[in-house]
Image (spheres, rainbow, N blue to C red):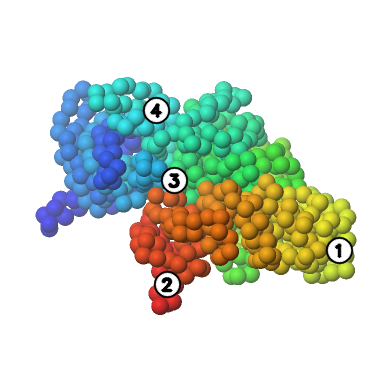
Amino acid sequence: MKKLLVVCLLFISVFSNAQQTDYVDYKSAKTYLGITPDSSKVYGKVWYNLEILKSTDSIFLDAVDMKFDNVYIRTEGDKESLDFRFYDDKIYFKYPFEKEKKYTIFFDYIAYPKKAMYFLERNDEWQVWTQGQGKYTSNWLPSIDDVNDKIIFNIGFIDCDLDTFLSNGVQSLSVPLPDNCMKYQYNMQKPMSSYLVAFVVGNYEVKKEISKSGIPLDFYYYPEDSLKVEPTYRYSKRMFDFLEEEIGFAYPWQNYKQVPVHDFLYAGMENTSCTIFSDAFMVDDIGFNDKSYVNVNAHELAHQWFGDLVTATSGEHHWLQEGFATYYALLAERDIFGDNHYYFKLYESAVDLGRQDLAGDGTSLLNAKSSSLTFYQRGAWVLHALRSLVGEDVFKKAVKAYLEKHQFKNVETSDFIKEVERFYGKSLNMFVDVWIKRKNFPVDAAFGLLQNESTFINEYLMVDCQAKTSKCKEYLRYYVSDEAKVKVISQMPELVTNDTFKHGFKVRQAISQYVRQIPKALKENYETLLDDKSYVTIENALYNLWNTFPEDRAKYLSKTRNIVGFNDKNVRLLWIALNLNTPFYQADNKQGLFEELVSYTDERYNADLRMNAFNYLNLMNACNDTCKSNLEKAKSHHNWRMVKFAKDMSEKLENKK
């Protein structure tokens, strides 16, 4: 062990006073991968083409807990065995590398990733997907964790189950092999950071479109979700065309793919040319009204420029990715839903940022440990405020110049500000100090901008039942925005009358949310909420009606019998729980319903559905042995929210004993 340590230290000594990027430039990588899902195994062959910048006797790749074999190097046509060592989650290659010479290193490897690659069963079929998240791709692919090192990745795959295989770039190869297997190859043309390398294996179908500029757009979906394709991907092409024009810089990759996966860790991830998103966003026409994919869709698409094309050098400048993506997603939504939607979203984020400061959790936008709220929403506010200050023409020219100058490179905040100053002709030091560097968000300045730019926001701020109670009844009767009416209902639900039900979707949903004890005078109109095109409204209304009017429980259960809701079956689970607690309602097999509820805690279902089912069983004091067994399994789930939930609920169950 001591001898191995000495050898490894000799291998890495050259990098003690310099970054590896000073010595070697990894140009491109070509891989062929295979997986064994039931053992969570990935294996493959990798070729790296590189150029030496300074003579050195060793270079490395990040590779977490891997085994290597058949390690070779090729210089000018000659292939020879290459000495290597694996140490501290890196593979070091020892060789007399000469300055300005090009080499190819290739090897076989095996890994059992503990993160960044996830092997899941969905509907009795395997689904495998990756999530690099900054620096974790090296858990399944020997690569470079440093986001400042960009490489052209070409990912190949051998599949013997005839599943769909997706990766970054364009599919350049699809060749049948013996034993019903297929060999695929996806190629990129431009370099990217390794955390943006991704692939998905699963059972999918695809809808294809082409953008106005000729970019192929592929929208993947599960075969059983054909009716969800249109509402899920609604406005996708429109947003793509809008962002290309708004940003002023052509989409930088060969194509764009989107694919939903089971139990994804986040809402979505902007892997270069291949966005992966949570299948919870696959919605039908009704679900679209409550929880659409539009914002996440636009956000991940904007990242293809801001994050993928230009990448922040470090966490200190993370807002250059998340703030830009949030801002341009808002602009895309503005194009679809209008100015009022845009300003209301800015208003909501300003309120949240102000509350964060009051709680003592505010930070500078250049703090690498800032919250997501700061990186995303404050970052978006910086861009809105900056555009308001310098004007639309200057702002657009600066963004375009920023992307052109730094494309396929890494950036800091000053790189963007310099471009704005160049076109603006003035210093932005004061702006940067107030909006970017200071710990507290400039909430007063933000509200001032909103009030100067939006009569809609002025009206919304005017409506305040806590300060002007006498006028609130009139607000519900006369013309103010639905958002303002929702505000009134949230503050004084007792003001709701039968006439209030005549207003729009948002107002009716607010009634279901805030009017919980239903006056008999409102009963007839309240019952119409069960017919609304909103799973949120139906869920709220069903519970409130069932709770307020026990004599009509059978009627409400009968009416909502066939409604499922979102992918987490929000309406169905509530319906089962209410049915089980309605003894006189005998239209169903109670034991069968209970077993159905328990079955949704099983690991084959998505995390949100499982947590919902666990919650209902806990509320009913009915978490049986099967429920407890599934809860125990949930503690080792790959999703941290599921793990935390399972541990918290287990503790609650223990305290009940």
Inspect the image, locate mark 3, and give the three-letter code of the amino acid beneath it.
Answer: His
Q: Secondary structure at mark 1?
A: helix
Identify residue for label 2.
653
Residue in view at x 44 percent, y 72 percent: 652
- Please determine whether, in this image, residue 281 is positioned above or below residue 407: below
Question: Label for residue 187?
Answer: 4
Q: CA distance from mark 2 to mark 3?
A: 28 Å
Badge number at residue 473: 1
Earlier-in-chain disc, 4 versus 1: 4
| Inter-mark Cα distance, 1 to 3 | 46 Å
Residue 218 drawn above or below residue 616: above
Q: Is residue 162 above or below residue 278?
A: above
Looking at the image, residue 264 sits to the left or right of residue 361; the answer is left
Residue designated by label 3: 262
Say whether disc 2 or disc 4 marks the residue closer to the N-terminus. Answer: 4
Horizontal side, residue 432 vs residue 72: left or right: right
Circle 1: is it few (<14), some (14-19), or many (20+) Cα within 10 Å?
A: some
Which of the pair 489/1 is nearer the observer?
489
Give amino acid for label 2.
Leu
Name the kind of residue labelled 1 in the image: Lys
628, 555: nearer the viewer: 555
The image quadrant of residue 301 is: top right
Q: Nearer the viewer, mark 1 or mark 2?
A: 2
Q: Are marks 2 and 4 in contact (CB under 8 Å)?
A: no
Expressed as whole percent of the image width and height from the top left, the position of residue 81 reads 14, 33
Q: Please identify the quarter of the rendering in which residue 512 is found.
A: bottom right
Judge depth for marks 2 and 3 and give the one in front: 2
Report helix, strand or loop for mark 4: strand
Q: Amino acid at mark 4?
A: Asn
Q: Mark 3 falls on what kind of element?
A: loop
